[in-house]
């Protein structure tokens, strides 16, 4: 293979991060067919895994569907609900939650009483995908695909410390501030949100 310039393709093992075998309440899908016209109307939450030498690390992320910005994230060695809660608390601390819909899968992290209580306490409406239907959560899945192809698979993390060092950098400095999205007019999420705010301010001045 070396003489012929061939390179083996690594097959990445699939790890399930969604545990839907529980008796917690399941909420209806509120975003199917919904027209989204601005930021902080729909957040999409999901969890993925990152392989390291001695196992896996888990990343919970929340994305604003309109701007594609990651508004909250958390990293953990376990799939405890505390992981999802940490990402949610980060998002709530920095964003407007008025008239907001939070969409997720039916995993136990998103249906547990502590997570649901935070959503309700902040007046956030709850929406969930149909069981086994990842297309309802396609925006988060798209982000995770980008993260792994443009960061994780290139660096081949070995330790938990590697993940803690690199993932925040990629999310905050690369994805949110630099990565261009065709759906945003080839602008990164933060620049797109600044443009939205600027245009909104101009409209208010005209009014």
Image (cartoon, grey):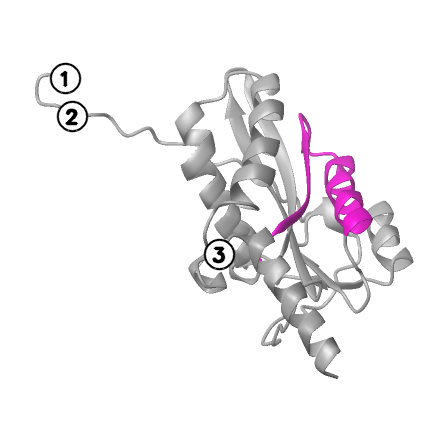
**Mark 1, residue position:** 2
Location of residue 97 in the rendering, given as x and y in whole percent from the top left corner: 80, 60
Q: Residues within 10 Å of mark 3 (few under 14, many from 20)?
A: some
Q: Looking at the image, is mark 1 or mark 3 nearer the viewer?
A: 3
Looking at marks 1 and 3 on the same chain, the residue that comes earlier in the sequence is marked by: 1
**Mark 2, residue position:** 6
- Cα separation between marks 2 and 1: 6 Å
Hey, which quadrant is residue 29 in on the image?
Answer: bottom right
**Mark 3, residue position:** 187
At 65% from the left and 40% from the top, the residue drawn is 60
Location of residue 137 in the rendering, given as x and y in whole percent from the top left corner: 57, 57
17 relative to 85 in the view: left or right: left
Q: Quadrant of the C terminus?
A: bottom right
Work out whether 129 lies above or below 201: above
Query: What range is drawn magenta here?
Result: 65-94
168 relative to 108 in the view: left or right: left
Q: Are marks 1 and 3 in contact (CB under 8 Å)?
A: no
Q: Nearer the viewer, residue 30 or 149?
A: 149
At 56% from the left and 16% from the top, the residue drawn is 159
Q: Secondary structure at mark 2?
A: loop
At 75% from the left and 60% from the top, the residue drawn is 26
Location of residue 78 in the rendering, given as x and y in whole percent from the top left corner: 69, 28
Work out whether 122 lies above or below 166: below
């Amino acid at each position: 293979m070396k003489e012929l310039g061939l390179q083996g393709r690594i097959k990445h093992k699939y790890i399930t991060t969604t545990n839907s075998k529980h008796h917690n309440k399941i909420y209806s899908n509120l975003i199917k067919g919904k027209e989204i016209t601005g930021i902080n109307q729909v957040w999409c939450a999901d969890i993925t895994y990152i392989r390291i030498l001695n196992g896996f690390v888990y990343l919970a992320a929340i994305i604003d569907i309109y701007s594609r910005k990651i508004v909250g994230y958390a990293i953990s060695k376990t799939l405890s609900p505390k992981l999802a809660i940490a990402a949610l608390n980060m998002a709530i601390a920095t964003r407007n939650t008025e008239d907001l819909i939070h969409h997720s899968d039916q995993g136990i992290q998103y249906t547990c009483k502590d997570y649901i209580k935070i959503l309700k306490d902040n007046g956030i409406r709850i929406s969930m995908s149909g069981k086994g239907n990842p297309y309802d959560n396609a925006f988060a899945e798209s982000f995770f695909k980008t993260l792994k192809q443009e960061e994780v698979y290139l660096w081949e993390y070995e330790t938990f410390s590697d993940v803690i060092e690199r993932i925040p950098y990629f999310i905050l400095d690369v994805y949110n501030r630099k990565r261009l999205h065709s759906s945003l007019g080839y602008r990164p999420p933060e620049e797109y949100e600044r443009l939205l705010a600027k245009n909104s301010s101009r409209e208010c001045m005209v009014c």
